Image (tube, grey):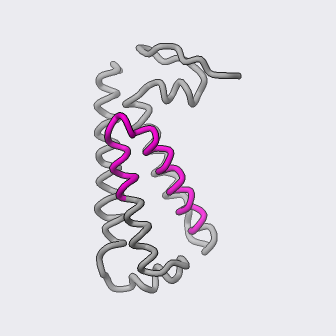
């Protein structure tokens, strides 16, 4: 597959990821719905704290999109999702979904910027400059 096609797929994935993080995920932290207090209490968080977490989620979701901030956004999203994994592990809930979201995010970023894959795997990619990776 050509690099422009991979880049387009990466952009679509990034946009879908950001929309998912902002609308249903963070949106649930800002809106009222039945069972919200019980669910957040089960996770060990107050509704007010979840609003702050929702703000962080929206900011990170927006940082993934612009090329200048996408890499930092990916790192911050990974940290955010690490907190989600830890929360779910602590209360005994399934924890694999935040891991899958993180993988999806990094694949999207790697398709947009092939040097990310080069750095991650220590090999060059077709169509990109060789990246010197310390060994």
The residue located at (34%, 71%) in the rendering is: 28
The residue located at (53%, 24%) in the rendering is: 118
Residue 112 position by quadrant: top left
Q: Is residue 65 left or right of residue 100?
A: left
The residue located at (41%, 60%) in the rendering is: 56
Residue 6, image x, y percentages: 34, 27
Residue 45, image x, y percentages: 51, 78
Q: Is residue 113 above or below residue 40?
A: above
Q: Is residue 107 left or right of residue 1?
A: right
* Residue lying farthest to the right in this orientation: 135
Q: Is residue 5 left or right of residue 135?
A: left
By secondary structure, the bulk of the magenta-drawn segment is best described as: helix
Span colored in magenta: 58-87
Residue 76, image x, y percentages: 49, 49
Q: State yes or no: residue 71 in magenta.
A: yes
Residue 15 position by quadrant: top left
Q: Is residue 129 above or below residue 103?
A: above
Q: Quadrant of the N terminus?
A: top left
Q: Nearer the viewer, residue 89 or 78?
A: 78
Q: Nearer the viewer, residue 76 or 17?
A: 76
Residue 121 position by quadrant: top right
Q: Is residue 31 above or below residue 70?
A: below
The residue located at (35%, 65%) in the rendering is: 26
Q: Is residue 57 above or below residue 68?
A: below
């Amino acid at each position: 597959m050509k690099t422009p096609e991979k880049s387009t797929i990466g952009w679509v994935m990034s946009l879908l990821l950001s929309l998912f993080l902002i609308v249903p995920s963070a949106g649930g932290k800002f809106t009222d719905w039945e069972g919200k207090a019980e669910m957040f209490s089960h996770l060990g968080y107050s509704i007010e704290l979840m609003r702050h977490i929702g703000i962080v989620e929206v900011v990170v979701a927006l940082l993934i999109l612009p090329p200048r901030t996408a890499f930092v956004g990916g790192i911050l999203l990974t940290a955010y999702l690490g907190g989600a994994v830890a929360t779910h592990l602590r209360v005994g809930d399934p924890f694999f979904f935040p891991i899958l979201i993180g993988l999806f995010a990094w694949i999207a970023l790697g398709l947009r910027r092939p040097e990310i894959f080069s750095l991650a795997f220590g090999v060059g990619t077709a169509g990109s400059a060789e990246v010197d990776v310390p060994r």
